[in-house]
Structure formats: structure tokens, C-alpha cells
Image (cartoon, helix red, strand yellow):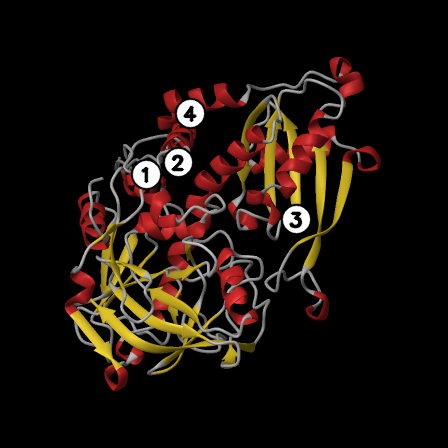
Amino acid sequence: MEYRDLRDWIERVRDLGELRDVRAATWEEDIGRVTEMLHHTDDSPAVLFDDIPGYPSGFRILANANATRKRLALTLGLPVDIERRPLMDRFLELTEQGRALAPRVVKDGPVMENVMRGDDVDVLKFPSPQWHPLDGGRYLGTGVVDILKDPDSDWVNLGTYRVMVHDAKRVGVYISPGKHGRQFRDAYFTRREPCPILVVCGVDPLLFIASTLEVPQGVSEYDWAGGIRGEPYEVITEPVTGLPMPASAEIVLAGFLHHDKKAPEGPFGEWTGYYASGERAEPVLEVEALYHRDDPIILGVPPNKPPYEPHRYREYLRSALLLRELKAAGVPGVVDAHCFGVGGCRLLNAVSIEQRYAGHSRQAGHVAAMCRVGAYLGRIVIVVDEDIDVTDINDVMWAVVTRSDPERSLDIINRAWSGPLDPAIAPDVKGHNSRMIIDATRPWEWRDKFPIAIGPDAETKRETRKKWGHLLAPQPAREKVAR
């Protein structure tokens, strides 16, 4: 890796010319607005906010970190000019079983530069933004890694669960139903025991990415990301909770969640593009210890209408994981898979196959809809033939409107895994949703008689763009010559 922590990563991005410094943007309005603009602009830079009014110079916020393929490649330790499929393939190689490396416990690290306990704890010292105008409060935890441990094993989970500031010593933590952290939390609560938790607001982008992906059951994100790095993460055993915290983290809040200590949390603009979960009572973390580096950096990854930053990198990484799960489930002939950013990389996924037998396309669609990567809050899975480019929404929809017919091409799965963030489900019945499988392949029974498609296949189109794409670049206007 070319970096050791978030600060090293920022300097490498600066060397690439993909970082902008912004000063004097307000936490009340400007930072949220600028971040939304960045999220919805292709190839936009990472931005480091500093000199935020009301806060010391050096208390910074980084936004839009992994929003380009180049910066994602840097995060994964890959060549920054790598193309889509090689990036996906290399990512899968880096996450193969047997590569995981458990973290290394150390006694000290940069996160210990400032340590506060008891009355000295003050969460308000950090410039937590009001990310969206209608949010119920300020959110310190958006680009956050929340660390919890299974009460019945040594399994440590790192997940991205949102964190709202209540006051100087209390924050609210919302975890969606079914997530590993929620399962751990609920196990403590069932026993009426306090649930230890660390809220880490600022880690290197690889560890953050790990906390947002479907890491295998029973595997800690520390170990999984360590395998990608080829080097164990250094962690410090946090004294209050006993949980491992990243030694080079920027900010860490430590304490316990309790089943009977709750406060209103939300509303919060979420990844579906809606205030879908409203306001309700959620567990409160009473911060018992606070750690931070000098001049700390908050990693800001607020949800926005899709696609926003995580959708841009998940289009590569979740697509790769979906491809792996389809093949692991024994589905043959899988050519490619893509999780569309416009659907939050969950609501709209496509799979291309080389058809080999009757029912093959339906098999691929149902597995894609209900495997671990596709199960949570899915909506539509489209299965297409191998000549369709699954990354091109126009190509995929062309297959839908020319190769599928509603009376024979649609399957519905009922009572699938959903949650409070699903905007299409009525507020009083959230929990389940349905899935639609669209079989947009040539009908198996008469595929050989299906009309021949015009135009090149997906690989030929990619080769053409690689060789001749310079023709699409804008040219300077030709100056008129006075006569």
C-alpha cells in the first residue's frame, strides 16, 4: 500500500491531482451542499474542508473520498489506471479465503494523542455537519466505523451505522435490522446487558470500505481488510469497552448501549434518496471516553439521492461480490454482474449469462435476488444474455423491452428481507418487501430463431472506445478569422 492511514491517503490523492482544499465552508449549510454537488458530478475530486467557522483551524472534514475508479484503485493498492473488470477480478483475488490477517495489538498510537474521560468528554468540539436541511440533527457518524463484538464468540464486527449528536456527551446509534452489528446489539439487549461499542469517525478508506460491504459470516472486517493490505492492522485495546480500536484512527468514541436508554433519532436523509425511516427512539451511547489525534479529520460520507459516493465504488466491489456468490452457488455460465448506482447498488441489479439449459436464466435471477449480496432491500434483478453490457443501463433496458414479455418473463418473490429505509413500503408494515425477476434473455425454447441483433458485443464496444475514444473528447472552438 502507498499509504498507512487516512492522512497518507490524502497526500497520495493530492499527488494525483484529485484533491481540493476548501476553507470557511459552514457546517450548518455549505458542507452538506458542496458534498451533494460532488456526489452527483462524475469524476469529481475529493474535498478537504478546513477553517470551518466556529472551530479551530485543523479540525477538518474529508468528503467524496472514493468516488472515482482511480481513487478506489489507490485505496485497494492497485494501479490507478486499471479498468473495470480487471479491478473487479483483482479485488476478488485479494479477498479470497485464506488471505485474512488478524490485527496486531499495540500499546500506543496516534489516536491516543488526546484522551478525555468523564467530565472532559465533549463531542461538540468536532464540526459535525447538518448534512441535509431536514435532518433531525447533526451527524458525526456518516463515514463511520462502528465496532461491536458478538457476546458469544470472538467475532468483532465493523459496520457503518449512522451516529447522531444529541449533546456533548451523548450520541444516538441507528443500526438497520438484520445487520451483524444489530444482531450483536440485540443479543446483549435480550440478556439485559450493556452492549460495548466504539464509534470511529475517521479511518483509512480501505477499512471504511470493508465496513460497508458484505464480508463473509464470522469474519472480522479487520482481518478481511488486513488480507487486502497484506499487513495486519494495528489496534489498541480500548480500556473502557475492551474492544480493539484502530491505532491510527482520527476520532474514537467509547461506551455502551443499553436496552432501556433511548432518545429520538432522525429523521435522516438516507441512501434511497428519502427520509424513509422518520424519527423514533433509538439507543443512546453515553460516551465514557473520547480519543482523537491532533487536528482530527472526520470522514464524511452522508447518504444522498443515488448514486452518491459509496454507490460509485460499490458499482465495482458489490458487483464483484455478486459475481462471486453466483458462481459459488453453482450457477454456470455467468459472464458478468452489475449493481447499478441509481438503485443504490441494491435495488436494481443485472446479470448476464450464457444460457445452457431450460430454467438457467430463472436460476441466475433468483440466486442473485436472494444471496447475501442481493438479499437486503433488493427490488429488481434483470437477467440478460452474454451479448448485453450489464454496465450500460440502456443496453440492459433494450434487452428488457425487446426480449422479455410480461406474461412469461416476470417472477415475483414475496416477503423478502427489507427494513425501515424502504420508501415503497407503508410505514406501519415495514420489514418485508417483494422482488421482481425479469428474464430478458432470448426464450430458451426458440432462442435459435430469435432475430439477430445488430451492433457489436460488449467487449467489441469496449475495445472500440479504448482505441477510438479520443474522438469523443471535446475540441477547442476554432477561432474565426477576420476577412
Q: Which residue is mark 1?
A: 228
Q: Residue at x 65, y 31 (%)?
A: 364
Q: Are marks 1 and 2 in contact (CB under 8 Å)?
A: yes
**Which label sits on residue 379?**
3
Rounded to the nearest angstrom, the CA distance separating label 1 from label 2 is 6 Å
C-alpha distance separating marks 4 and 2: 30 Å
Q: Which mark is residue 319?
A: none
The furthest residue to the right: 407
Give the quadrant of residue 279: bottom right
Q: Check disc 4: other Cα within 10 Å, few if <14, some if 14-19, many if 20+.
A: few
Mark sitting earlier along the chain (4/1) = 1
Spot occupied by residue 31 in the image (x, y as percentages of width and height):
34, 68
Visible residue check, residue 73: no
| Mark drawn on residue 465 | 4
Name which residue type carries label 2: Thr
Give residue 320's position: percent from left, percent from top: 47, 35
Left or right of 130? Residue 440 is right
The secondary structure type at the circle numbered 4 is helix
Mark 3 or 4, closer to the camera: 3
- Residue type highlighted by circle 4: Arg
Disc 3/disc 2 C-alpha distance (Å):
27 Å
